Amino acid sequence: MKLIKYVMSFKEIFKDDNTWNEKTIIGFMSFAVMVLFAVADIVTGALGKDLVVQEFIYNSFTIITLGSFGIAGLEKFANRG
């Protein structure tokens, strides 16, 4: 029963009249992936191995994070006027 309620609330995200800010959710998820990359790099560095992450992949997550939070922030301030 709880799973059905969770799935129904997940579907609410994709409606036009919801209270969720999708840009912030995507930005947070992208930032979380960047943090996981950093932690994995520190752990593998401590173990003496080199974590190889392609630069364009990391840059893509950076652009997604900055873009998502930037757009969400601009929308927040633009709606005040």
Image (cartoon, grey):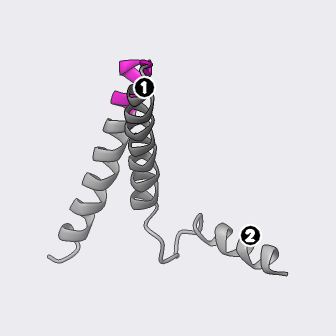
**Where in the figure is residue 11, as x and y percent of width and height?**
67, 67
In-image side of 65 versus 18 (left or right): left
| Quadrant of the frame with the N terminus | bottom right
Residue occupied by mark 1 = 57
Residue bearing mark 2: 7
Q: Residue 70: where, in percent of width, then height?
A: 25, 53
Residue at the image position 30 percent from the left and 45 percent from the top = 67
Q: Which residues are magenta?
A: 49-60
Q: Nearer the viewer, residue 73 or 78?
A: 73
Location of residue 78 with respect to 69 vertically, above or below = below
Secondary element at tag 2: helix
Instruction: Name the N-terminal-most of marks 2 and 1.
Output: 2
* Residue 31 place in picture, x, y as percent: 38, 48
**How busy is the neighbourhood of tag 2: few (under 14 within 10 Å), some, or many (20 plus)?**
few
Q: Secondary structure at mark 1?
A: helix
* Residue 53: x %, y % from top left: 43, 21
| On-image quarter of the C terminus | bottom left
Determine if the magenta segment contains residue 64.
Answer: no
Above or below: residue 14 compared with residue 2:
above
The residue lying toward the viewer, choosing from 68 and 32, is 32
- Identified by mark 1, the residue type is Ile
Question: Which quadrant of the structure image shows residue 58?
Answer: top left
Residue most extreme to the front: 47
Amino acid type assigned to the residue bearing label 2 in the image: Val
Image position of 33 (left or right of 7): left
Q: Look at 65% across and 68% down and name the residue there.
A: 10
Q: Is residue 2 left or right of residue 49?
A: right
Residue for point 48% across, 77% down: 19
Q: How far apart, in angstroms, are the residues tagged by discs 2 and 1?
A: 30 Å
